[in-house]
Amino acid sequence: MLGILIFFSSLIAFWFGNFLFAIFLILSGLIIAGLSLRDPREIEIIVTEHEIFFGTRAYHYNEFKSFWLNEDEEGTKKLFLASADTEEVTLIPVDESVDPFELNDFLETKLPEEPIAEPVMEVLVRRMRI
């Protein structure tokens, strides 16, 4: 779908004599296509008594306002963490090997549980199957 959009947009840009914009469209389409072919990076997430580790970065529980553990239509369990400072929401897919009830019980001792809406971009990405 992206290829078709880039192709016709480039044709229209060439048609109107905007060659630089057409070249920009073609290059950006190639870059996005190349990046979409890469496998996603896997980051190890460790939940401990005092903090949550995302790869090599540690976040203390006081950096989060609340959490919400939810399951989407496809059965994927997701942990939402609302930032204490901003309106940012961190979305973490929960591995099938993790017991969601145990994770929920543990996080309730550290953070309040509040419903958190799924970020709009996450919904768009899932619906567009990007």
Image: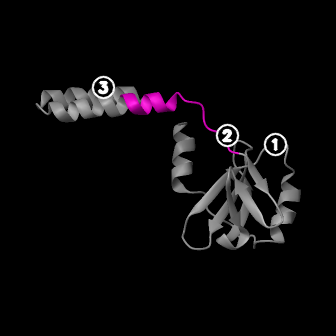
- Which residue shows up at 61% across the image and 62% down it? 117
For label 3, count other residues whose C-alpha is less than 10 Å away and answer few (under 14), some (14-19) or many (20+).
Answer: some
Q: Position of residue 5 (x, y in %)?
A: 34, 31
Q: Secondary structure at mark 2?
A: loop
The reply to whether the magenta stretch includes residue 37 is: yes
Q: Residue at 89%, 58% (x, y): give it.
A: 102
Residue type (three-letter) at the residue carrying disc 3: Phe
Find out whether the residues at labels 1 and 3 contact each other: C-beta distance under 8 Å. no
Q: Which residue is mark 1?
A: 96
Q: Which residue is mark 2?
A: 42
**Amino acid bearing label 2:** Glu
Q: Secondary structure at mark 1?
A: loop
- Please state the horizontal and vertical placement of residue 61, each as a whole percent of the image: 72, 69
- Labels in figure, total: 3
The image shows residue 7, relative to residue 24, as above or below, that is: above
**First of labels 1, 2 by sequence position:** 2
